[in-house]
Image (spheres, rainbow, N blue to C red):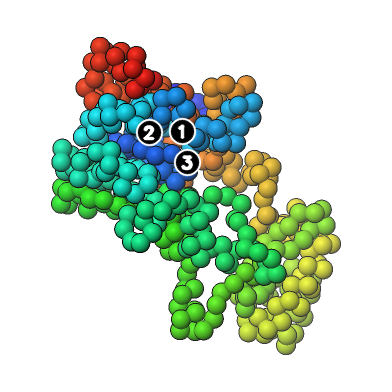
Amino acid sequence: MDRNAASRTDREGIDEIDAAGIEPVGPLAGLVVLELGSFIAGPFAGQLRGDLGAEVIPVEPPRTGDPMRGYRTVDGRSLWWPGIARNKRSVAIDLRDERGRALVRRIASSVDVVLENFRPGLAGEWGLGYGDIASTNPGVIVTHVSGYGQTGPRAAEPGFGSIGEAVGGLRHVTGDPDRPAARAGISLGDSLAALFAVIGTLSALHERSRSGRGQEVDVAIAEAVLALMESSVADWEIGGQLRGRTGGILPGVAPSNAYPCADGKDIVMAANADPIFVRLCAAMDQPDLANDLRFHDFAARAAHQRELDELIATWTRTHDHGALLQILQDHAVPVGLINTAADLATDAHLAARDMILRLAAPGFDRLVPMNGVVPKLTRTPGAVRHVGQALGAETDAVLSAFAGAERAELAALRAAGVIA
């Protein structure tokens, strides 16, 4: 696929973008990222950079490839891989072989960023630590993603997203109060770590533009989760309040909950501000509720939260979700359908925003849907230039361009099983 193709799949749409003066390359065009690692946190961080135009070079084991190639499979093909590996140049090198590590050091000597999510210390043992790379590439940014960070008493322990969600405090507040702690349903800890890895890397690159010097970026999954825990520690340490699991409600904020519809769907509504609550009462054709002493202001509604939610649910159950959404939108009440994947696939607003992309992928007889590019930039938008490649598709090209490898060297390395 054309590297400069915009994320819209129709040619007419691309022409319209070009005609509007939008440059069909991402804002990170020219940035080269070497991705070392596997599973979700590292590859997702690489995907986000690639979406915005960076040249991302993931290194995978020659025989098995990244374990993500085996996630969410249908007929042996991963439905996740085309998306999380998009915009990347697949290179297959055996990092357990010193010859392979030497090749990667040669690549690392000429890139802007090295992203790794190995066990802390392993990169250094392999001669791929910050000091090793910076000795020949002093401006390099080396971004580490791990369970607990590169320092501290737990640094050497293995860490996964689920453990980070527990240690960072998220699991304690997720779910219903009368049940054990719940998982969010997605790999939230890994994804948060990936986002902070991108933020940290871009911050280091901005500083490098002033100083000319590289540095390390240390991202711990547990800390990425903790960063989103709002004032939980202050609530406990100073206010004496320990946040816990509250299910679908936000305690003391009403009405703000999920409500059932007549057709089995659920909506989420937030009408806790006084003017919005007045509009909700009008939408319900019960304007007097706004003057009821149980609900007339924020504090009263908080004190009678359960009673108010039951009243609203009684009303919402009398409407199908489509009619209910229209009524509430007409009254400017913030509302949204609790979308399933089936709903996401057909949501008109998401389609208008190019947030569900359907692209051809090797081995599939139909287009593969994947999430769109976030955020949207007006002049240099991100794009999906190609989906995840076959294992090692660009090994020779990358090693020739970045490691100066000649044809004879490549042939010898391939014969020895060091590359594929």
Nearer to us in this view, 254 or 326: 254
- Going by the numbered disc 2, the residue's amino acid type is Pro
Task: Give the CA distance from mark 2 to mark 3.
Answer: 12 Å
Q: Would you call the spot at circle 1 few (<14 residues within 10 Å), some (14-19), or many (20 or more)?
A: many
Image position of 33 (left or right of 15): left
First in residue order: circle 1 vs circle 2? 2
- Going by the numbered disc 1, the residue's amino acid type is Asp
Residue 100 locus on image (x, y percent): 30, 27
Nearer to us in this view, 254 or 324: 254
Secondary structure beneath disc 2? strand
Residue at which label 2 appears:
58
Q: Is residue 205 visible?
A: yes
- Going by the numbered disc 3, the residue's amino acid type is Phe
Residue 134 locus on image (x, y percent): 18, 42
Secondary structure beneath disc 3? loop
Residue at which label 1 appears:
66
Image position of 335 (left or right of 118): right
Say if 154 sits above or below 106 in the image. Answer: below
Q: Which mark is residue 39?
A: 3
- Nearer to us of marks 1 and 2 is 1
Nearer to us in this view, 247 or 148: 148
Residue 28 locus on image (x, y percent): 32, 40
Q: Quadrant of the C terminus?
A: top left
* Residue at the farthest bottom position: 293
First in residue order: circle 2 vs circle 3? 3
Task: Give the CA distance from mark 1 to mark 2.
Answer: 9 Å
What residue do we see at 34% from left, 31% from top? 95
- Nearer to us of marks 2 and 3 is 3
First in residue order: circle 3 vs circle 1? 3
State yes or no: discs 1 and 2 in contact (Cβ < 8 Å): yes
